[in-house]
Amino acid sequence: MVMRLMMIRHPLSDANAQGIVYHNQQGGIDPRGYEQIEKLLHRLNGENFDRIYSSDAYRCRILAERIAEQRGVKVIYHPLFVEINNGDWHGKTKEEIEKRLQADPLNTRPPNGESLRDLADRAEEARKFILAEGGERNVLISHARFMKMFLGIQIGLNPIQALNHIKFSNCAISEIRISDGECMIEYLNNRDYLQK
């Protein structure tokens, strides 16, 4: 069976706006993030989904619940879909984290956190989970790094390539067709509707 999966990154958060990296902490939504949600909901008018999968972080949950509310669809929250666990590096800037990862970006694990390899392994488990749950058309609401790994492994990229060559903007939508062993990208990181 081939499944259509729409992938949506969460709306702009306060930490995104400040350039701060965090894991699955609650945080707030930037005022521009709320505008993105409204534009996205308008863009999704007329779209139907069987299931919504989401990280349980507030920045994902707020969007998942709004989409589910409009369509009467259940949201499935699962720890597989959360952002990379930055452990003790929580609250650092992107630049600070990149410096710490320079020697071995794939395998360096922050204290009490996950490496990029760990995240890629979790993304593979998430793919299996979603395919096992079924449905013809589903939505995944998550975080940039997680979705890069999720898509990257399906199109044959290694984790470093996926991190460096795939982009997911806040509230942009992407859609893929997946089955066990195949993936076709319908469109990637579409945000035209956010510019209106």
Image (cartoon, grey):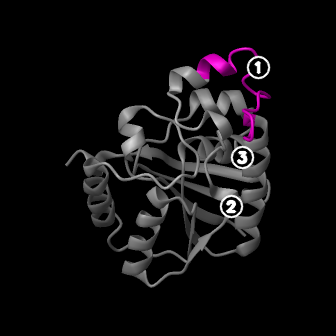
| Residue at screen point 48% across, 59% down | 60
* SS class, disc 3: helix
For the residue marked with disc 1, what is the amino acid?
Asp
Residue 26 image offset from top left, x and y in percent: 49, 56
Quadrant where the image shows the N terminus: bottom right
Horizontal placement of 31 versus 54: left or right?
A: left
For the residue marked with disc 2, what is the amino acid?
Pro
- Decide whether residue 115 is among the magenta residues: yes
- Earlier residue among tags 2 and 1: 2
What range is drawn magenta here? Answer: 98-116
Q: Which mark is residue 158?
A: none
Tell me whether the residue at label 2 lies in contact with that at label 1, contact meaning CB atoms closer than 8 angstroms.
no
Q: Which mark is residue 154?
A: 3
Rounded to the nearest whole Å, what is the CA distance between mark 2 and mark 1? 26 Å
Q: Quadrant of residue 48?
A: bottom left
* Nearer-the-camera pick, 104 or 180: 104
Q: Which mark is residue 104?
A: 1
Rounded to the nearest whole Å, what is the CA distance between mark 3 and mark 2? 20 Å
| Residue at screen point 64% across, 39% down | 86
* SS class, disc 2: helix
Q: Which mark is residue 79?
A: 2
By secondary structure, the bulk of the magenta-drawn segment is best described as: loop
Horizontal placement of 74 versus 172: left or right?
A: right
User: How many C-alpha atoms fall within 10 Å of the one at disc 2: few (<14), some, or many (≥20)?
Assistant: few
Residue 143 image offset from top left, x and y in percent: 54, 48
| Residue at screen point 48% across, 48% down | 187
For the residue marked with disc 3, what is the amino acid?
Gln
